[in-house]
Every structure is written in C-alpha cells, then in structure tokens.
Image (cartoon, rainbow, N blue to C red):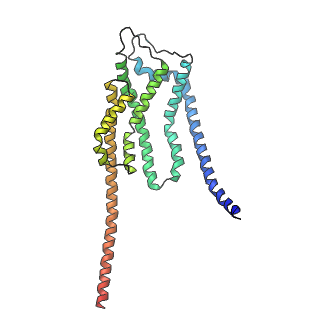
Amino acid sequence: MAAPDSQPGSSETEQPFLAHLMELRDRLLRMIVAVVIVTCVLLPFANPLFSLLAGPLMRHMPENSSMIATAVASPFLIPMKLALILAIFVCVPYLLYQIWGFIAPGLYRHEKRMALPLLVSSTLLFYLGVLFAYFVVFPLIFAFLTTTAPEGVQVMTDISNYLDFVLTLTLAFGAAFEVPVATFVLVLLGMTTPEALVEKRPYVIVGAFIIGAILTPPDAVTQTLLAVPMWLLFELGVLMARLFVKRKDEAEMETTGGATAEDELDTELGRIEEQERGRD
C-alpha cells in the first residue's frame, strides 16, 4: 500500500526537476545559436579581422617582412578560429543574460540586487582588460620582442602561434581586471574583511608580480604592465568592500537602535504599571 502512495509525491518532485532541465537545455541552445549566428556574420571578415589583430606586431616587424603559416590548413583555419572566438566575446552580454535568466528565479530579492551589478561590472571590467591589452600592452611587448632578435635572425612569426600568444595575454588581462569583483565577493561572503586584506597588501603586490612574470613574456615592462593594474584594482576592490561594510554596519546600527528604543519603551511602561499596582 505504501508504494502507490509514494508514486505521486515522486512524480511531483521529478516534474520541477525536468522543467528546470528543459529550461536549461533551451537556454543553452539559444546561447549556441547566438554564437553560431555571430560567427557566420564575422566569417566573411575573418581575414581583415586577423590583419587588424596582427597590426600591433606588424607595425614593429622589419620592412618587407610578413607572418608565415607552417601548417597547410592554417591560412584557412586560423581566421575561422579567430571569428569564432570574437563571436564568443561579442555574445558575452547575451550569454550572461541567459545565465541570469536561469538562476534569477531561485535568488532572494537582496541576492538579485547584489548579483546583477556584479555581473554587469565583471563584464565591463573584462572588456576593459581586453582593450588595455590590445591598445597598451601589445605595442610595448612587440616593440621589445622584435628588437631583441640576435643578428642574422629574421623575425617571422607563425600565425597559429601568434593567435595563441595573443589570446593568452588577452585572457590574462581580462581576468586580471576582475580583481575588484573577486575582492568584493570575498568580503560579501564573509570569507575575509577589508582590514585583513589591507594587512595582506605586501603579499598581494608580490603575488601580482609573480603572476605577471608567469603570464607575460620575460621582460620587466610587460610584467609591470600586468602587475601594477592588478595591484591598483585590488585597492579599488578593498575600497568598494569598505564602503559596503560601512553601509551594512550603519543599517544594522539603525535597526539595533530602533529595537533598543522599543525595549526601553516597554520597560518604562512596565515600570509605570508596577507603580500603579503598588498604589492600589
């Protein structure tokens, strides 16, 4: 008799789970379709886009030199790969919108108020890091690397290696510019405090230079260009966290103050009642 009674409950539990899976499938399909559409739009411009990406290097290459393709299919596949990667970059706001639409119904109101600004700010900071890498870092890196070639060595960069190198640096700077958001989230989750982060500032600075040395070519200029922004962005994150904690403490003090006033009023009323009873 117990088995038939348990079946309706299990089916009710499975239905919401299946509905969530179907919604997740639909949103993933929308994300894939969006990336495919943008890729198809960019494919006719794949070669000009690669030329634009190669601009910071080509401006510092020796005269009458060019890039090379060592693999047979590289001249065809590498621009297509670039078009796909650029399509993902362009679709990031839409992809985050789909992710937000899936997780938002399960969040509380105060969590929604915090999560949405964090998503928007993290996206903008990532794009800012990519632009910083392209317009500031790449010209300095390639100006340095092309002048360090030994005598008799002709600089001829393979397009596949160049794309991998540029993507690595781009993602490194995009991720580095997420430091303020990461710092703020750590404080928001209660894993640390602004004061504790300030105490660890020397370790953060050393760590930033170590990360810069690992992710960038072995020259002090590029390492500094990654490490210094990471340090400054860490300070920005600490400042944001301090403002958040200050506002939170002020709100708690107002709430506590209101409760204390009510308690004092109840105590005063109780004292008056006792006095009246004593007179009777």
Position of the N terminus by quadrant: bottom right
Q: Nearer the viewer, residue 184 or 59?
A: 184
Q: Quadrant of residue 253?
A: bottom left
Residue displayed at 37% across by 14% down: 149
216 lies above or below 96: above
The answer to whether residue 24 is left or right of residue 205 is: right
Q: Nearer the viewer, residue 26 or 183?
A: 183
Residue lying furthest top: 152
Residue displayed at 31% across by 76% down: 267
Q: Quadrant of residue 24?
A: top right
Position of the C terminus by quadrant: bottom left
In this figure, what is the number of numbered marks? 0
Residue 125 screen position, x and y as percent = 40, 38
Residue 257 screen position, x and y as percent = 31, 65
Residue 234 appears in the rendering: yes
259 lies above or below 40: below
213 lies above or below 143: below
The answer to whether residue 13 is left or right of residue 267 is: right
The answer to whether residue 276 is left or right of residue 178 is: left
Residue 130 screen position, x and y as percent = 41, 31
Residue 3 screen position, x and y as percent = 70, 61
Residue lying furthest bottom: 280
The answer to whether residue 169 is left or right of residue 247 is: right
Residue 52 appears in the rendering: no
Residue displayed at 32% across by 57% down: 249
Q: Nearer the viewer, residue 257 or 91?
A: 257
Residue displayed at 55% across by 22% down: 77
